Amino acid sequence: MTKSELIRRLAERYPDLYLSDLERVIDTVFDEITKALARGDRVELRGFGAFSVKKREARTGRNPRTGSAVQVRAKTMPFFKTGKLLRDRLNGKQVDKNAEDKF
Amino acid sequence: MTGRTITRADLSESVYATVGLSRSESGDLVEAVLDEMSDAILREGGLKISSFGSFAVRSKKERVGRNPKTGVEVPITPRKVLVFRASHILKKRMNEGNE
């Protein structure tokens, strides 16, 4: 499934809302998650999962083709951990979709 | 780096402020987005969000694990796991300013 299909699904649930508004809802959700991660914040969405930030130290890497040393800057990487509810649903466990989730 | 934790409440507040729907509608919509995302992952085994990243279900075979405390070998049953791969745009936006 892609973002445009996600918008279409949402439109089926909310036939009274404008498609352009639904598109903005979805864009806002992912934009806010991105901004939070850029600030170094964690995003916890119970039942779905959590996004966190991992730091990678600067290191001396090597160009695999030439073997020459190159400096790799310190950087941050996003990391996703699946929520318990979604993980259990993936593995066919009977779960109450509205139950409290734990990480 | 503020070290906060963002939740559904923050996302619905942003939707409320940006889109101009009511607070309760905004909250419902955030919930609906997450719900549709979960359903798509379960139904189709994946979900791609352009300029954000993609989610994919991977099947893991059975393997031998070990209780790290007791050293006792235990089989780890076959299972499905969800992996997230960030798009280069997300990675770039996270590292802006220190390049």
Image (tube, coloured by chain):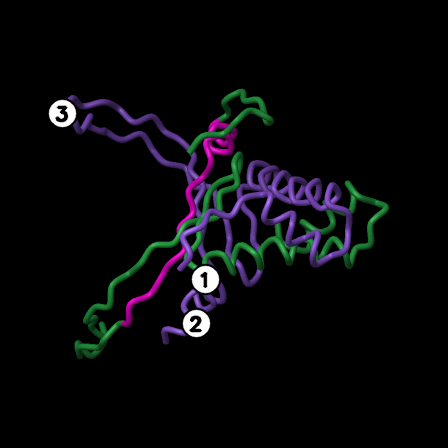
Chain colours: A green, B purple
Q: Where is mark 2, residue-wise?
A: B96
Name the residue at 47% across, 28% down. A88
Count of residue discs: 3
Residues at marks 1 and 2 on the same chain = no
The magenta segment? A73-91
User: Where is B39 relative to A69, above or below?
Assistant: above
Residue B85 at what x, y percent from top left? 44, 54
Task: Examine the image and state in which quarter residue B40 appears.
Answer: top right
Residue A80 at what x, y percent from top left? 43, 47
Q: Earlier in the sequence, mark 3 or mark 2?
A: 3
- Classify residue A4 as left or right of residue B49: right
Looking at the rendering, in which quadrant would you find the C terminus of chain B? bottom left
Name the residue at 40% across, 68% down. B95
Looking at the rendering, in which quadrant would you find the N terminus of chain B? bottom left
Q: Amino acid at mark 2?
A: Glu
Q: Amino acid at mark 3?
A: Gly
Residue B71 is tagged as 3
User: Where is B21 relative to A47, above or below?
Assistant: below
Helix, strand or loop under label 1: helix
Q: Where is mark 1, residue-wise?
A: A38
In this view of the protein, which residue sits in the foreground, B72 or A96? A96
Q: CA distance from mark 1 to mark 2?
A: 8 Å
Q: Which of the chains bears the disc numbered 2?
A: B
Q: Amino acid at mark 1?
A: Ala
The 10 Å Cα crowd at callout 1, few under 14, some 14 to 19, many 20 or more, is: many
Pointers 1 and 2 in contact (C-beta within 8 Å): yes
Helix, strand or loop under label 2: loop
Helix, strand or loop under label 3: loop
